[in-house]
Image (cartoon, rainbow, N blue to C red):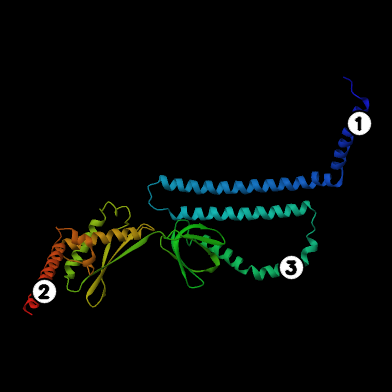
Amino acid sequence: MTTNPTVLAAARVSAASATQRWHDFWRGEIGEWIITRGLRIVMVLIAAVLAARFVNWVAQQVTRQLDIGFAESDALVRSEATKHRQAVASVISWVSIVIIGIWVMLQIADVLRFSLGGLIAPATVVGAALGFGAQQLVRDMLAGFFIIVEKQYGFGDLVTLTVVASTDASGTVENVTLRVTRLRSADGEVLTIPNGQIVKVVNLSKDWARAVVDIPVSINADLNRVNEVLHQECERATGDPVLKDLLLDAPTVMGVESIAVDTVTLRVVARTLPGKQFEVGRQLRVLVIRALARVGIVTAADATVGLVEDDPAVPAAKAARDKAEAAGDKSADAGDTTTDAVQRR
């Protein structure tokens, strides 16, 4: 089979023409711009993305190492230094990404040969307008800077924040940046609060905490006996399997806190590990109620305490059952009297 020389010549001419157009494209203005400036912009963008990913990776590694160190240690709560390091790592990561973004914009402006000198006057006007509009942003960042520098709170702290609107936000700190603070409330809600709107900080887990337990007893109760029982339970609390690791020292009986018409309230306080005051308070209440019930002293809410009424070995429970049986007998007698009266009629 023979090939037509005319067809081969046409194919060669077409290929040569396509090759020439390809070379002409890259030698033209567009091709030269792509090779000289466009490629440089792409390289800058790739470098910025890699740098941002590296910064995030380093921040995640720091956070992970802090979490692993806390999990492998015998400590029940995070140290103040660990919480501060985690907050600083988060802020450094955020600031580094912002700096990378500014560097990218300056590099692209330089590649595009964008003259910044001609924008001085317009930039002044725009800057003044943005200055009025960005006052809150600047305030948030300054407030966040001082929160972190002064170590007011850090990751994992239990805090109550009062904002400008005189409302309180309580929860566990999950993240702190220069602009906002994120809290996780007891109901699982995530609260994001601008740092510039925080006017008061109550840190419930700074260095140590205090559990406060108020015990209301009847005004007719023997207060000397009640104090004796409370002191005994405070001494035993340090040996309790639940409380011994949470208490920093033995609980203290403060004495009578308040007096009402029919009750006297006594207070017991205990110094605990940061953030463990609520758990210690709940366990202390259980111990105190059981101890008072064993000696026949019941609190003002003895009628609603199922533990006292269910334990037959407790004198207070026996008294409650006798009282209930007596009330039942009286009701039965009253019913019989009513029936006899009806029959006589």
- Choose top left, top right, bottom left or bottom right for residue 180: bottom right
Mark 1 and mark 2: span between their CA atoms?
124 Å
- Say whether residue 327 is left or right of residue 10: left
Mark 1 and mark 3: span between their CA atoms?
63 Å
Answer with mark 1 or mark 3, whichever residue precedes in sequence.
1
- Farthest bottom residue in view: 345
- Farthest top residue in view: 1
Q: Position of residue 95 (x, y in %)?
A: 60, 56
Answer with mark 1 or mark 2, whichever residue precedes in sequence.
1
Numbered badge on residue 10? 1
- Say whether residue 295 is left or right of residue 32: left
Badge 2 is on which residue? 334
Around disc 1, counting alpha carbons within 10 Å, would you say few (fewer than 14), some (14 to 19), or many (20 or more)? few
Tell which tag, 1 or 3, sits nearer the viewer. Answer: 1
- Say whether residue 143 is left or right of residue 30: left
User: Looking at the image, can residue 250 be seen?
Assistant: no
Q: Position of residue 269 (x, y in %)?
A: 30, 64
Q: Position of residue 65 (x, y in %)?
A: 49, 46
Task: Identify the amino acid type marked 3.
Answer: Thr
Which is more toward the observer, 232 or 311?
Answer: 311
Badge 3 is on which residue? 124
Residue under the image location 34 percent in, 60 percent down: 278
Residue under the image location 27 percent in, 62 percent down: 285
Mark 2: secondary structure: helix
Q: Contact (CB < 8 A) between labels 3 and 2?
A: no
Answer with mark 3 or mark 2, whichever residue precedes in sequence.
3
- Say whether residue 84 is left or right of residue 20: left
